[in-house]
Amino acid sequence: MEQLINDFSPGLFFMQILIFVLILFLLIKFAWRPILESLKIREESIQDALNSAEKAKEEMATLQADNKKLLDEARKERDQILNDARGIANSIKEEAKEDATKQAEKMIEDAKKAINTEKQAALTEVKTKVAELSLQITEKVLRKELKDSKAQKALIEDFIKDVNLS
């Protein structure tokens, strides 16, 4: 430090101060304002970016809430559609069961009618055959019994008596 004091020159000191003040003046006049303005612009752009980020965050939260709401509505609508479809399917099943039951009952009724008709036809045919056979048997019996004329006269007299009594 002693050496600095020994080498001290007032002219040099004064010149250095003058150069320093001049450079300081030039910096303030020409560089200080642009530097401050650029810092201000940078600060504003950072603030704008932060504001935009905050807005984006709020919009994102709003969009997420809207998406959740839409998903809930879609789920409710899907559940409603499925319930309606199940109801329709059940009603179609019930209608099909009722139709099948009605058709089965109708088929059974038709079958019973057909059976009764066939039964009546068979009974009629049996009666007809029995009547034919009875007539044939009666004819054969009468022919055998009525070969002689006395038997014929006696049979005719019996018929006349029966007719008179009736």
Image (cartoon, helix red, strand yellow):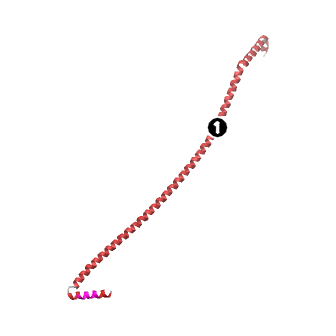
- Image height check: is 64 above or below 20? below
The residue labelled by disc 1 is: 57
State which quadrant residue 42 falls in.
top right
- Image height check: is 77 above or below 51? below
x and y, in percent, of residue 73 in the image: 58, 47
Q: Residue at x 60, y 45 (%)?
A: 69
User: Please, what is the dominant secondary structure of the magenta stretch?
Assistant: helix
On whether residue 11 falls in the magenta region, the answer is: no
x and y, in percent, of residue 147 in the image: 20, 85
Amino acid under disc 1? Lys
What's the magenta region?
A: 153-160
**Mark 1 residue crowding within 10 angstroms, few (<14) / some (14–19) / many (20+):** few
Q: Quadrant of the C terminus?
A: bottom left
Task: Report the side of 3 relative to 49 (left or right).
Answer: right
Q: Residue at x 70, y 26 (%)?
A: 40
Q: Residue at x 33, y 74 (%)?
A: 124
Please, what secondary structure does the residue beneath circle 1 have? helix
Q: Quadrant of the N terminus?
A: top right
